[in-house]
Image (cartoon, rainbow, N blue to C red):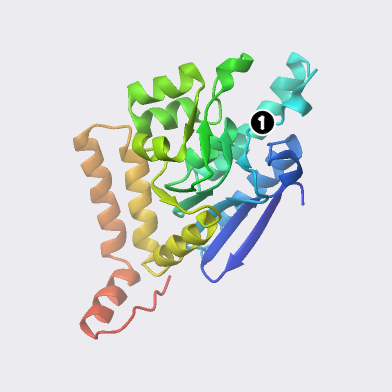
Amino acid sequence: MDGVTLRRDGHVAEIVLDRPEALNALSTAMARRLAAVCAEVAADASVRAVVLSAAGEKAFCVGADLKERNGMTDAEFLAQRPVTRAAYNGVLNLPQPVVAAVHGYALGGGCEFALSADLIVADETAVFGLPEVSVGLVPAGGGTQLALRRLGPGKAADLVFTGRRLGVDEAVEYGLADRKVPAGTAREEALAIAGAIAQNSPVAVRAAKRAMRLGGGVGLEAGLDLEENAWRTVVFSADRREGIAAFNEKRKPVWPS
């Protein structure tokens, strides 16, 4: 369905990049669908964690569909830009924690989709890269900023300016991937992580994600104020009351939210 499939299992939603015949390259139609799916998931209070995965065996996503872009005029590039940006922002701005399950090529926009997640699980076949400068472009799905924040200035510059590719071991060493798993098991591991997240208070998890995301670009004092706001959000919530009651009663919490 326009290259994106949405699956649900309890409180976990799985967004699947589903255009394997094109190595999940992001077309205009696929971008529109992805933005719509992300908006649907973001608005669903029953979803507590999200997995971003991909169909096919060769690639997570190889970035923008350059075949579609071949021959596009400047006006057509400008017209496409809000559509693709909405897709990247849709993943980045999901209020629920997002776990990317990466296998095969995660290049250009595919790498940026992974960088937009909170956790990146990569299997032994994963290859990451931001090669945009090699075709006269810059990473523009958040890549320059997300790589900078995740990797630091030196490693981000290495990745962006050279356009080189990182295998899974170097990606883990760089901090571009958080967990390395055997080939073919990234999705399984990501779903397990999302399932564990979904067992926790959705109010607390969302508040923690918001504080961490907003705090990444501010000074320590401003960051601590964000943490204070997160604490005030949760301390007066029904989830806090249920969580402490369940702990003392030695049972699993039943989150009212």
- Looking at the image, which residue is at 50% across and 23% down? 164
Amino acid bearing label 1:
Ala
Seen from this angle, which residue lies furthest right? 71
Residue 27: percent from left, percent from top:
73, 35
Q: Position of residue 222 (x, y in %)?
A: 24, 36
Q: Position of residue 199 (x, y in %)?
A: 40, 70
- Residue drawn 72% across the image and 26% down it: 66
In which quadrant of the rendered image does the C terminus lie? bottom left
Q: Give the residue at x 46% y 61%.
A: 194
- Of 64 and 124, the residue lying toward us: 124
The image quadrant of residue 154 is top left
In the rendered image, the vertical position of residue 77 relative to residue 103, given as above or below: above
In the rendered structure, the answer to whether residue 166 lies left or right of residue 184 reads left
Disc 1 on helix, strand or loop? loop
Residue situated in front as seen by the camera: 27 or 215: 27
Determine whether 94 is above or below 71 in the image: below
Badge 1: residue crowd in 10 Å (few <14, some 14–19, many ≥20): many
Say above or below: 18 vs 239. above
For the point 32% across and 46% down, the residue is 211
The residue to which callout 1 is attached is 64
Q: Is residue 174 left or right of residue 104?
A: left
**Residue 151, percent from left and from top:** 36, 31
Q: Is residue 95 visible?
A: no
Q: Is residue 129 left or right of residue 251?
A: right
Give the total of numbered labels: 1
Q: Is residue 112 above or below residue 194?
A: above
Q: Residue 22's quadrant in the figure? A: top right
Q: Is residue 129 visible?
A: yes
